[in-house]
Amino acid sequence: MSVPDRSINPRLLASAEAEFLARGFIKAELKTICENAGITTGAVYKRYKGKEDLFCAVVDDIAEQLDLFVKERAHIDFSSLSDAEIYQSWQMTYDTMIPLFRLLYEHRQTFALLIDKAAGTRYENFSHDYVTEMSYAYEQYYAEAKKRGLAQTEVTREEFHVLLSSFWTCICEPFIHDMTWEQIKEHCRIICRFFNWSDVIMLKEGNS
């Protein structure tokens, strides 16, 4: 009985990642991916339905981790939080933001594919959809701050979406432009100064 070649899939995914990064999904050639991986197209179709399925296999992991990241922040029991904790949740600091940048840097190539090379795949609207998810999370925190009398101005859903679109662009751009980790750390400090969410909702400090 023949032994399956377990080295094929890692080689295939690495070759696919390189080709998609270089040419984007639409222009990437399955033939080139196979040649660079040293496999036949038949071996691809035994594992994936086609080029799009292969692209998604490359980016699925980071997409799922990002989805979990925002869902954990969107669904929270506010009754367990004090006013002071609600207030603190709106303070964007280096320490609270750097874990996200670290996650993205660890997956920087697949993240760049997801946000910049996915046209023609089911992930082509990922950034828009992700901003919508982030907006929902921010709206929950805003509604709670408003209910407690901590947020002192009106901010519409449309405005949150516009602001978070800008915020997401600031998160993505370092990876599109292949910044170093040192540059990204400094970028994190800068956007923490730039996006003052407390001022956006005119937040007043709560009681402990």
Image: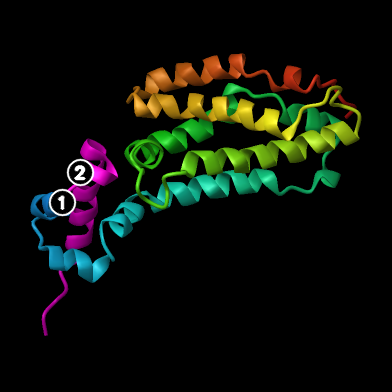
Q: Residue at x 47, y 44 (%)?
A: 126
**Mark 1 vs mark 2, CA separation in Å:** 6 Å
Which comes sooner in the sequence, label 1 or label 2?
2
Horizontally, is 173 left or right of 138 in the view? left
Residue 27 on the magenta segment: yes
Residue at label 1? Answer: 33
Q: Residue at x 10, y 60 (%)?
A: 39
Q: Which residues are magenta?
A: 1-29
Q: Amino acid at mark 2?
A: Glu
Q: Residue at x 79, y 33 (%)?
A: 86
Q: Position of residue 172 (x, y in %)?
A: 45, 29
Horizontally, is 177 left or right of 86 in the view? left
Horizontally, is 2 left or right of 97 in the view? left
The quadrant holding residue 1 is bottom left
Give the numbered dot on residue 19: 2
What colouring style does the render use?
rainbow
Q: Amino acid at mark 1?
A: Ile
Q: Position of residue 142 (x, y in %)?
A: 78, 33
Relative to the observer, which residue lies in front, 99 or 104? 104
Q: Callout 1: few (<14), some (14-19), or many (20+) C-alpha neighbours within 10 Å?
A: many
Residue 203 against residue 157 in the figure, above or below? above
The answer to whether the residues at label 1 and label 2 have Cβ atoms under 8 Å apart is yes
Relative to the observer, which residue lies in front, 86 or 40? 40
Horizontally, is 18 left or right of 188 in the view? left
| SS majority, magenta | helix
